[in-house]
Amino acid sequence: EPHREHHDADHLAEVIGGLDVLVAEGLGFDAELAKTAAWFHDAVYDVHRADSVERSAELARRWLGPGYGARVAEIVLATEDHIAPPGDIEAAALCDADLSILGQDERRYDRYAAAIRAENDYLPMSEYRRVRAMVMTRYQNRPRIFVTEPGHRLWEAKARANIARELTTLGRPVPV
């Protein structure tokens, strides 16, 4: 879809790559299940609606059936706020892989941030800055952005630095 500047096939490949990294780092989870959820997690993406994640989860339920589809939908729903239910390692892995973009090098992060702005270009810049700063501050204020051990070890420090840098460019004080 033409409105997808970040939430596109390249993002899907990066998320699946993030899951592969977590597997390579020894995280024990059902990687195939998490990858199936990755395919569905942004299947519906409409910046003008607040229910894209729920609609993506519903698509998984419909296409994959009541048992497997319901489980995939549960994992997809965790990506709404990127907080996995306690003990749901597949959801934790998907959330970390989805957020791994935050922990990339500055150039990649900046391309990501520009793509997010492009997806939301209908918003006036002042409103975009306010909303984006609010979202990124929520991540920065978490005790841990990445809940899996490998995700935390690999991406946390760089993600915090990237978010702090972006918050500065958005004109917001960096949370301490």
Image: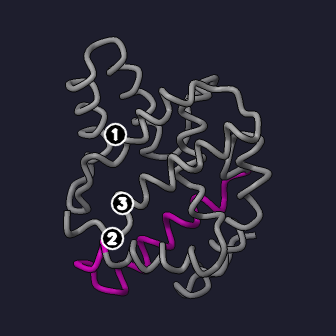
Question: SS at mark 1?
Answer: helix
Q: Which residue is mark 1?
A: 40
Q: Which image quadrant for residue 71?
A: top left
Q: Nearer the viewer, residue 125 or 30?
A: 30
Q: Nearer the viewer, residue 28 or 167?
A: 28
Disc number placed over residue 5 in the picture, else none: 2
User: Looking at the image, is 82 positioned above or below residue 69?
Assistant: below
Please state the extent of the stretch shown in magenta in the rendering. Answer: 119-143
Q: Nearer the viewer, residue 15 or 171?
A: 15
Question: SS at mark 2?
Answer: loop
Which quadrant would the C terminus be assigned to in this image? bottom right
Q: Badge 3: few (under 14), some or many (20 or more) residues near its Cα, within 10 Å?
A: some
State the colouring used for the structure image.
one colour
Looking at the picture, which amino acid does disc 1 mark? Phe
Is residue 123 on the magenta stretch? Answer: yes
As measured in the structure, the alpha-carbon distance from the residue carrying label 1 to the one carrying label 3 is 12 Å
Is residue 121 on the magenta stretch? Answer: yes
- Left or right of 10 on screen, residue 47: left
Q: Nearer the viewer, residue 76 or 17?
A: 17
Residue in the picture at 60% in, 56% down? 100
Question: SS at mark 3?
Answer: loop
| Disc 2 and disc 3 in contact, CB within 8 angstroms | yes
